[in-house]
Amino acid sequence: MIAVPQQPETICLPILSSQDRGWENILVEQFQHPQGEASCHFSDEHALCMSLAPRPVRFLQIKGGKTHTSLYGKGDISITPAKMPFFARWDSDDCYLQIRIASRFIQRVATETLNLNSDRLELFSEFRIRDRHIESIGLMLLSELKQENWGGKLYIESLANVLAVHLLRQYADTKPRLSRYEGGLPQRQLIQVLDYINQHLERDIKLADLAALLDMSQFHFSHLFKQAMGVPPYQYLLQQRVERAKQLLKQTGLSIVDIAFLCGFNSHSHLSKQFRQLTGMTPTDYRTG
């Protein structure tokens, strides 16, 4: 029997969280805390922890009836499947990113995208791995978490789908075969999607909405859209919102705040930031130029 120390647990509160961002199927949080210990148990979510510590931290972990002790450096990742209790003790200041992804979402991706029987699906428990794909997705999620604007839901949904497929391909007990689709969306379907985006720029367009138009999985839709257009759906949507803003700035006397909302941005600053990134100037400079 493994003896778990009976010291008071460290109360781990995140310094950044997507809790109130409206992100679906995925929760992303950054933690930073001193030496201590903690335990957790997520019944409906798989948990991925990625070290952000500037110096390696010595960890003792207990999960699945196994104990593991080692140094965790920046980029090291652990995976804890849903329903598995987890205990950890660390001996110095620690900083890490935790990604919790809903097990029902993983099951849906398994069924819709990979044609797997999700009823028997299980993810492996991993104590310490290096995975450049998870690390890259984690850093992109962290970057979005640090943004002041509250947009980018289509982007988050795309990242969540890519992460889910990667976990299923690399860390599931049943190895799926991912179908290959070449050539992008047929022109008729592409026009249907582009028209929908153009008619609903002011709305919170979701990846699920676009995929449902063509009755395909979100992952496959994203892949085929990028093949056809050269950019992923979230980037195309952003480009079109900025193009609409440019038209309104030149052709109307609407305030920049009103234009922001009409184009699907949630604030003046959100529009200004994205506008500057794509055009190299502010909306005001563009209007008066």
Image (cartoon, grey):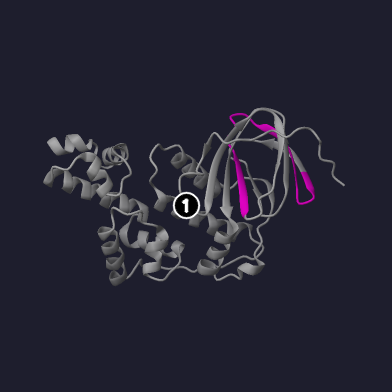
Q: Position of residue 135 (x, y in %)?
A: 54, 44
Magenta span: chief secondary structure: strand
Query: Is residue 52 found inside the magenta-colored segment of the image?
Result: yes
Q: As drawn, is 106 to the left or to the right of 9?
A: left
- Does residue 178 show up? no
Q: Amino acid at mark 1?
A: Leu
In the picture as drawn, the residue positioned furthest to the right comes out as 1
Range covered by the magenta-colored residues: 45-67
In the figure, is residue 173 to the left or right of 286?
right
- Where 229 sits versus 288, above or below? below
Number of marks present in the image shown: 1
> Is disc 1 surrounded by few (<14), some (14 to 19) or many (20+) residues within 10 Å?
some
In depth, the one of 175 and 246 nearer the eye is 246
Q: Residue at x 72, y 46 (%)?
A: 86
Q: Secondary structure at mark 1?
A: helix
Q: Residue at x 79, y 48 (%)?
A: 66
Q: Position of residue 34 (x, y in %)?
A: 66, 27
Residue 268 within the segment the image draws in magenta: no
